Image: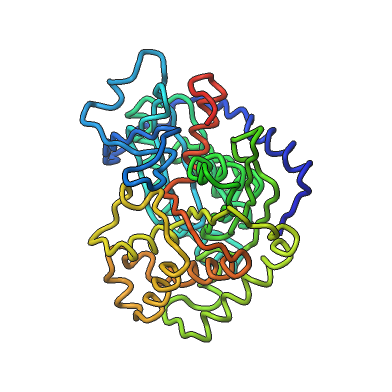
């Protein structure tokens, strides 16, 4: 667990957000990756949604013009890759006058950290899955001619004893040179990617990022003199959906197993909540993870996952409780058949819910805002700001 005093954290966060990610290289020879153009324009500011409800501060609009060709000359193409304990995600974007336009993306569950908590090593099967996925990312980066890159790895590569050998193999076979970031950098990037969704009419949020191998919690606040959300305190615990499900079992989860998972997470969160959980007036929860986006999809009764419906949606405490209860009442087979969960997440989603419930008990806030964004968006914003291609939020 990591906790940093407020003054030191602010200095550290400012330094992190000025990190110079200067790797600019042509990756290894292209392979056969499928390219999908998203044409997703993320704007950094907006106002209120229709009917007086708060809209996303990073509103998403979909265009029909070819995204890369539509950019002004010299704006460049940026790529952000996040190799997590569970997922491999890539986002490629070009800056615009008010944000950035996503021109390509990739996401695949590869379970890089599968078994790491028990063996201490990334397995050969997980390495093979990662190399295949990263090869597709390499192809997309080359195809889009992205030159400004940041390519990160998180908890699995922090924890595994063979992480250095894994990274060497990835570099040799795909040309991708992974940067293993620490938990504080991970928290800072999550804040940078998600802070546009902090309610502009409120005082701040408790941001949480439930990963595969770790979970980060950040208290972010704004004030009248500085409306941009700032980190006040943060922590990280060595539990994510993969590690918690491996310890307690994620396939057949009884109420007793679920309660045990929640207690284990609460044990790690309680000291942070006791120190930084006071005075929650005009604050809300802000979640970025597959857990909360899955819950939102089920809550909205979506026939299939739709980012446009999920990102920035609000759920009240009753909605969250009811949706988690619905999941607890499902069998493994029923979860696997649900299109918002799928077979790939069916044995992980309840572990994520247990982490969320521990957070909710520690920070009993009435509203949760769901973010389908995070580290990749944070990396893109950071690089574009460093290059002067993007103004502050």
Please name the residue shown 33% across and 49% down the image.
Answer: 307
Please name the residue shown 68% across and 52% down the image.
Answer: 234
Side (left or right) of 30 relative to 262: left
Please, is residue 341 above or below residue 140 in the view? below
Please, is residue 12 above or below residue 269 in the view? above
Please name the residue shown 51% across and 60% down the image.
Answer: 212
**Measured from the top left, where is residue 124 in percent x and y?**
48, 59
Name the quadrant of the N terminus.
bottom right
In this rendered view, identify the residue nearer to me: 47 or 12: 47
Residue lying at the far top in this picture: please name it.
73
In this rendered view, identify the residue nearer to me: 375 or 33: 375
Please name the residue shown 69% across and 63% down the image.
Answer: 273
Side (left or right) of 168 relative to 73: right
* Any part of residue 348 in sight: no
* Any part of residue 351 in sight: yes
Please, is residue 100 above or below residue 35 in the view? above
**Measured from the top left, where is residue 83 in percent x and y?**
49, 48
Q: Quadrant of residue 141?
A: top left
In this rendered view, identify the residue nearer to me: 165 or 242: 242
**Measured from the top left, where is residue 238 in percent x and y?**
63, 62
Residue lying at the far front in this picture: please name it.
52
Q: Quadrant of residue 91?
A: top left
Q: Quadrant of residue 57?
A: top left
Task: Indicate how the structure is coloured in the image.
Answer: rainbow
**Measured from the top left, where is residue 122 in percent x and y?**
54, 59
Side (left or right) of 310 relative to 255: left
């Amino acid at each position: 667990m990591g906790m940093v005093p407020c003054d030191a954290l602010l200095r550290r966060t400012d330094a992190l957000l000025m990190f110079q990610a200067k790797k600019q290289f042509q990756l290894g020879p292209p392979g056969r990756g499928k390219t999908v153009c998203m044409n997703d324009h993320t704007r950094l500011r907006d106002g209120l949604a229709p009917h007086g409800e708060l809209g996303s501060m990073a509103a998403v609009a979909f265009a029909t013009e070819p995204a890369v060709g539509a950019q002004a000359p010299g704006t460049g193409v940026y790529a952000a890759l996040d190799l997590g304990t569970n997922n491999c995600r890539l986002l490629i974007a070009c800056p615009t006058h008010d944000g950035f336009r996503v021109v390509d993306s990739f996401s695949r569950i590869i379970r890089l950290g599968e078994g790491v908590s028990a063996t201490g090593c990334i397995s050969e099967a997980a390495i093979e899955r990662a190399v295949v996925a990263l090869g597709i990312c390499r192809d997309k980066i080359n195809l889009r001619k992205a030159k400004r890159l940041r390519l990160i790895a998180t908890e699995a590569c922090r924890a595994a004893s063979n992480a250095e050998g894994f990274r060497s193999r990835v570099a040799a076979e795909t040309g991708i040179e992974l940067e293993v970031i620490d938990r504080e950098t991970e928290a800072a990037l999550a804040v940078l990617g998600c802070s546009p969704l902090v309610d502009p009419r409120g005082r701040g949020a408790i941001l949480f990022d439930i990963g595969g191998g770790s979970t980060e919690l950040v208290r972010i606040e704004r004030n009248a003199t500085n409306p941009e959300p700032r980190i006040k305190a943060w922590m990280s615990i060595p539990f994510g959906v993969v590690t918690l499900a491996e310890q307690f079992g994620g396939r057949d989860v009884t109420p007793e197993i679920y309660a045990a998972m929640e207690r284990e997470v609460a044990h790690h969160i309680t000291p942070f909540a006791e120190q930084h959980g006071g005075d929650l007036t005009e604050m809300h929860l802000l979640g970025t993870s597959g857990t909360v986006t899955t819950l939102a999809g089920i809550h909205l009764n979506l026939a299939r996952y739709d980012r446009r419906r999920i990102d920035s949606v609000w759920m009240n405490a009753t909605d969250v409780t009811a949706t988690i209860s619905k999941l607890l009442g499902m069998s493994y087979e029923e979860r696997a058949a649900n299109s918002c969960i799928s077979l790939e997440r069916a044995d992980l989603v309840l572990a994520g819910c247990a982490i969320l419930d521990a957070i909710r008990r520690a920070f009993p806030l009435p509203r949760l805002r769901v973010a389908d964004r995070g580290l990749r968006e944070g990396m893109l914003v950071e690089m574009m700001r460093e290059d002067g291609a993007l103004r502050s939020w």
